[in-house]
Image (cartoon, rainbow, N blue to C red):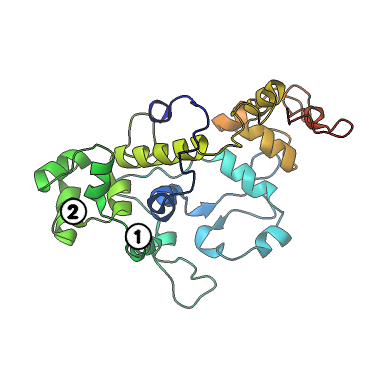
Amino acid sequence: MHRLLGRYPGYNPRVDPSVSNVFATAVYRFAHLAIQPMLTRLDANYREHPQFPSVSLSQSFFAPWRIVFEGGVDPLIRGLISRPAKLNTQDHMMVDALRERLFQFVRQLALDLGSLNMQRGRDHGLPGYNAWRRFCGLSAPRNQAELAQVMNNTELAQKLLDLYGTPENIDVWLGGVSEPFVRGGRVGPLFACLIANQFKDIRQGDRFWYENPGVFTKRQRLALSRVTLSRVICDNTGITTPGRSKAAQRGRGRKRGSLESEVKTELWRSSCCRFTHFQ
């Protein structure tokens, strides 16, 4: 992703920063395959919460009362930063809570998130898997042998062709999430390309992007570049100690509210009749 995204080249008024149809409708829904079947809730010591234990995902949909009456967001965020996301594998893509029990807790009829993702793409008129592979300059498999090579899985390629007849008909969401991951990533080559393209357009086409000269002062840009996820969690919850995740570990050793780690708000303080962030 770092290679595909590259350095920020500056604002380009000819770039459209709006979110593309394929990105919103299919690509960024790859994370549905990273959802665990349980919502882990931990106490301040990062142990199972004694009063509000972890709850199944299928019993959490449309249940905001669990946050209001069952300990707030802190136990949930501790669980999220301390437990790994589900690993998407070709033989276990989506948990049953999403495939067979979506919204069952609040509705009589359960839904299937995977089928919804594919139908949404069809409703939006998205081209198929191979069309987007060509868009990204990737090979477009024509038969089982070529599809098996792309997927690095002969059995999966056969199953896809049994359903679709030809690689041209494969829904872009299903084809994208079926690909083996790129090195160091959580998506395959197609979605890596489409995500990078979208992020580049958002960045280059936004004249208020924080790195664009003139939007912020040099000191303000430096302060913003130092913001970490652990800092955001620390500033917006009652969590004072990091968990075991890499994002949380970056904040270990820093005192809550220390000037070293927080955004210095005085850099944005207005002076007389003008704002310091306009030059």
Q: Quadrant of residue 237?
A: top right
Residue sitting at x 47%, y 24%: 7
* Residue at the image position 68 percent from the left and 64 percent from the top: 65
Label 2 sits on what residue type? Glu
Give the mark nearest the N terminus, 2 or 1. Answer: 1
Q: Is residue 142 left or right of residue 269?
A: left
Decide if residue 242 is in sight here.
no
Q: Nearer the viewer, residue 261 or 100?
A: 261
Q: Residues within 10 Å of mark 1 (few under 14, many from 20)?
A: many
**As drawn, is 237 to the left or to the right of 166?**
right
Calculate the distance from the C-alpha at mark 2 to the C-alpha at mark 1: 15 Å
In the picture, the disc for residue 168 is 2
Q: Residue furthest right?
A: 272
Residue 247 against residue 93 in the figure, above or below: above
Amino acid type for the residue under numbered disc 1: Gly
User: Label for residue 121?
Assistant: 1
Which residue sits at x=13%, y=59%?
165
Which quadrant is the C terminus positioned in? top right
Instruction: Identify the image quadrant of the N terminus.
Output: top left
**Secondary structure of the residue carrying numbered label 2:** helix
Estimate the x, y position of residue 47 in percent, counting from the top left: 64, 42
In the image, residue 78 lies at what x, y percent?
63, 42
Q: Nearer the viewer, residue 111 or 192?
A: 192
